[in-house]
Image (tube, rainbow, N blue to C red):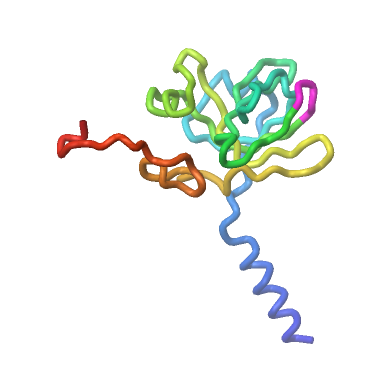
Amino acid sequence: MKKFAIITTVLLVVGLVGYPVAAQTVASISDLLANPTADQETTITGTVASTQDGENDFVLSDGTGVLNICAGPAWHQLIALTPGEKVTVTGQMDLGSPQNANAAGRTEAEGPSIDAFTIVKEDGSTVVVRDGPGRPPWAGARGRGQGGPPASTETEDADGD
């Protein structure tokens, strides 16, 4: 019996390793946008206000404001959401640096967004976008990520041109 208790404890500890620390829960989108902090982890609930065909980015509304949610590239994992669907998003604030904006096809004028880690849908199902902060699973050098589009076929000279 003691052996069972030790094994159970070890499995519980091993199971918790690698999961992100619980994110800060924000009362509303307006509270979050009043004082956004780069890389702040948060969980927020709202309704999908709009989606983009063939893309994972969507707009979340909670009655106090709207916020762009980025859920990774569709070629990595297409996430099916519909306007009007209630979801809970856990992720990390992206304040919209030019590098991130260009990589995600956004402009800085679009303001802060959340890079989603998980999305819990209305039916209780959970979509895992990524494990947490840091390098996402689809990132790779020049298209050599996990399942990403192929690297450019153009050749570069020694100067990178």
Furthest toward the left, the residue is 158
**In this rendering, position of residue 60 left or right of residue 144:** right
The verdict on residue 84 being magenta is: yes
Which percent across, then down, holds residue 154? 30, 34
Q: Which residue: 65% across, 74% down? A: 10
The verdict on residue 89 being magenta is: no
Query: How many marks on residues?
Result: 0
Tell me if residue 34 comes above or below residue 79 in the rendering.
above
Residue nearest the viewer, comparing 124 with 146 = 146
**In this rendering, position of residue 107 left or right of residue 154:** right
Which percent across, then down, holds residue 96? 46, 23
Residue nearest the viewer, comparing 116 with 75 = 75
Q: Which residue: 61% across, 28% down? A: 55
Where is the C terminus found, in terms of image quarters? top left
The image quadrant that residue 7 belongs to is bottom right
Where is the N terminus found, in terms of image quarters? bottom right
**In this rendering, position of residue 107 left or right of residue 9:** left
Magenta stretch: give its range.
82-86
Which percent across, then down, holds residue 116? 60, 36
Furthest toward the right, the residue is 123
Q: Which residue: 61% across, 27% down? A: 57
